[in-house]
Every structure is written in structure tokens, then in C-alpha cells.
Image (cartoon, grey):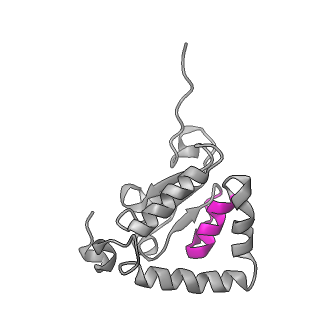
Amino acid sequence: MRSAPTPDPLLGAANGLAPRPVLVYDGDCGICTRFARLSTRLRRHSGDYAVAPWQTLDLAALSLTEQQCDAAVQWVAADGSVFSSQDAIARSLQAARAPVRPIGALILAPGVNALAGLVYRWVAANRSRLPGGTPACSLPPAQRPG
């Protein structure tokens, strides 16, 4: 019996399959990696969206740059739209299991989104000093491993 082709999470349309969203995170950051693991567990099905560190991806194929990915988590929607920071987190939560989807919608609500942005920027600026932060988080981008 022949098995169905395994969809490549990032090629989608290039291999004849429908593209799916991708959550792109910093694989050198412990906080980012923890969120990526949580996001993977919260997916309804493993095929709902891909979760991958930017260091392993062809960023140009996703219309992303290293600078964007180093600055914030990214969500590339199936249609190619790109969302960053708290908006990326919100989109990933909206694509997750039912109990957490409303949290994603709440983060996108006016007022809440602005506050979420402030929190995101504070965490990003202080990630090397927070629990789960790694020494790589405090290095300038050019000196980080990978």
C-alpha cells in the first residue's frame, strides 16, 4: 500500500499541497523555544501549522529577514501575510485548540494589543535576564551561535 506524501511544512504550494502557516522563532532563545514547544502542544493537529526556528529555514522563501526574526517571533499565514511579536503569538493561539483561541483574539483587541506589545518588547529586551533566557540572548546578532 502506497502512503500519502508527507507534507513539507514550509513548501506547501511548491509541492502541490496547500500551504500552511508557520510559527518562526529564535532557536537560540530559551524563552522563545519554550513558547514554541507550548505552541506545538497546543496545536489541534500536527498539520495545522509548522513551528520552526528561523536558523533552520529558508527565510527568503517565507518573505522574512534575519533581522525580523532576530527581533521578534514571526507568524507567516498560509496566504503569505506576516505578523510579528504579540500579533504572531495571538495568531498562533487562534490556530490552537479551542480553550486558548479566545486568548489570541483578546491579544488582538484594541487596547489589549497595545499593552501586549509593551509586554512583548519588555520581555524581548530583557530575555537574557529572565528565567529561561540563555547567554546567546544577550549577544549581538552577529555574535550569536548558528
Q: Residue at x 66, y 85 (%)?
A: 114
How many labels, in total?
A: 0
Front-most of residues 35 and 73: 35
Question: Does 83 lie within the magenta span?
Answer: yes
Front-most of residues 24 and 103: 103
In the rendered image, residue 24, in percent from the top left (x then y), is placed at: 49, 61
Front-most of residues 29 and 67: 29
Q: Residue at x 54, y 29 (%)?
A: 5
Q: Residue furthest front?
A: 131
Q: Is residue 51 left or right of residue 145?
A: right
Assign the magenta stretch its main secondary structure.
helix
Q: Residue furthest top?
A: 1
| Quadrant in the picture for residue 12 | top right
Question: Does 107 lie within the magenta span?
Answer: no
In the rendered image, residue 101, in percent from the top left (x then y), is placed at: 72, 60
| Quadrant in the picture for residue 113 | bottom right
Q: Is residue 5 left or right of residue 103?
A: left
Q: Is residue 104 left or right of residue 117?
A: right
Determine whether 52 is above or below 141 in the image.
above
In the rendered image, residue 41, in percent from the top left (x then y), is placed at: 56, 51
* Quadrant where the image shows the N terminus: top right
| Quadrant in the picture for residue 110 | bottom right
Which range of residues does the magenta coloring cover?
A: 79-94
In the rendered image, residue 123, in percent from the top left (x then y), is placed at: 48, 81
* Quadrant where the image shows the C terminus: bottom left
Q: Residue at x 54, y 52 (%)?
A: 40
Determine whether 67 is above or below 101 in the image.
below
